[in-house]
Image (cartoon, rainbow, N blue to C red):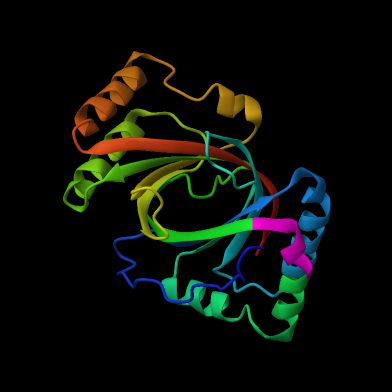
Amino acid sequence: MKKYIYILTILFSFSLSAQDGFWYDVLLEVEGEDTNEFEKTVDGFYSSLDFPDDVTLSFSRIQIKGQGFEETHILSFLSPSSESLANFLSTLSGSKWENYIEKVRPYVDSVRRSAGIVTKAYNQEDVDPIGQAWLFKVKSKDAPAFYEEYTKVMEVFDFAGFSGTGQITHGVSNGESHFIYATYDDLNSAFTFGPKNDVEAKAFASFFEATADFAEFSQSFTRVLIKEYN
């Protein structure tokens, strides 16, 4: 690992009446020959922890990604409470944490972190093993319009999995500020994602037309769940 892993423990505080969740991601680059030992080491550490009732960790491989996206794994922490999430992250310290870092460091070539807010979410109980994120560059003044157009699509789109949108508040990369995230129960569902009828097709077209002037699509990546901890 090029630099020691430090956990960010201070997140912006927002009213929970306006947001559905807070997330913190650690993205890591691991060489193929080290994958098995790396995953065993990560699982051994997080399996030994007691997670609060309102904090969840998803450990995943990043299986599909664009050019220049080097990270191979992602640790995604999620909570409806910014305080609970920050408090849990602050517990990742001490001798047990130091020992874990010493074990995992040789397998990791690089690491970066980001954090943010889920502003709007649908089917929150249907978080499936396949997840896809679309990242956008949106100016702050246009964020309400971006969320509004997303909501219009979801009001007519018959989507079986979880879907959410929100803001990247920490660790912004290449100007990306907002995301849309969706999950699928299997790879076939991910491959066949998209509008299934004229109404849904028009809704998708309207979204891209309405956001064309202020939302620039940046990149997308797809992760496959290894294990969830809660």
Please determine whether, in this image, residue 215 is positioned above or below residue 141: above
> What residue occupies the far front of the structure in this picture?
2
Question: Magenta residues, as a range?
Answer: 103-109
Please determine whether, in this image, residue 47 is positioned above or below residue 111: below
Q: Main secondary structure of the magenta part?
A: helix
Q: Is 107 included in the stretch rendered in magenta?
A: yes
Left or right, 34 with respect to 175, comes to: right
Residue at x 29%, y 61% (from the top left corner): 18
List x then y, in percent, for residue 89: 56, 75
Residue at x 44%, y 17% (from the top left corner): 196
Mark yes or no: residue 139 visible: yes
Q: Is 217 included in the stretch rendered in magenta?
A: no
Counting every numbered tag in the picture gives 0
Residue at x 78%, y 49% (from the top left corner): 35
Please determine whether, in this image, residue 142 is positioned above or below residue 222: below
Residue at x 63%, y 63% (from the top left corner): 2
Image-quadrant location for residue 122: top left
Left or right, 95 with respect to 212, comes to: right
Left or right, 144 with respect to 46, comes to: left
List x then y, in percent, for residue 204: 32, 25
- Please tell me which residue lies in front, 93 or 88: 93
